[in-house]
Image (cartoon, rainbow, N blue to C red):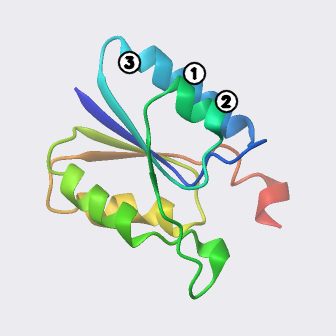
Amino acid sequence: MKVLHVIPGLPKRSSGTATFIRSLFKAQLSSLDVRLATIAPVDPIISEEIPLLAFEHQSFPVASLGRSSDLYRYLQRESKSVDIIHCHSLWRLSSIYPEFARRGSNAKLVVMPHGTLSPYALK
């Protein structure tokens, strides 16, 4: 089974989501064909621990959108050969891309909001 994880970013001093994704990714490596795609910058410690692809972040029109045309094109290509796209987070374009990219393919989408629906985050 092929699983493609997508997370908006893995910067230095990142949240518990980064810790979770590292643990999950490492656990899945032994039995699955697993990949991780994110938007740069990436904490060098994380990139040394697990193989990942980091795509350029585009700040136009608004940096906080998490826009990356390269990530979207990658997801469109890869969705044809993966079984599951596992999206970690909400509220950024990098979290919307997986649904659009997988349409027309057999890939299933799993969305894990990780606390982005907590009362604090919703404020």
Q: Where is residue 3, by image quadrant?
A: top left
Relative to 58, residue 20 above or below: above
Amino acid at the residue labelled 1:
Ser
How far separated are the C-alphas under marks 3 and 1? 10 Å
Distance CA(mark 1)–CA(mark 2): 6 Å
Disc 1 marks which residue? 23
Q: Would residue 83 appear left or right of 66 to someone viewing this image?
A: left
- In the image, what residue type sits under mark 2? Thr
How crowded pointer 3 is (Cα within 10 Å; few <14, some 14-19, many 20+) is rated as few
Rendered view: 116 above or below 112: below
* Image marks 1 and 2: residues in contact by CB distance under 8 Å: yes
Secondary structure found at label 1: helix
Separation of marks 2 and 3 at Cα, in angstroms = 16 Å
Residue highlighted by disc 2: 19
Secondary structure of residue under mark 3: helix
Q: Along the polypeptide, which appears first: circle 3 or circle 1?
A: 1
State if disc 3 and disc 2 touch (CB < 8 Å). no
Q: Are marks 3 and 1 in contact (CB under 8 Å)?
A: no
Residue positioned 30% across, 56% down in the render: 75
Identify the amino acid type marked 3: Leu
Task: Give the residue at mark 3.
Answer: 29
Please report the residue visible at 57 percent of the width from the left and 66 percent of the height from the top.
92
- Percent of width and height locating residue 59: 59, 78
Label 2: element kind:
helix
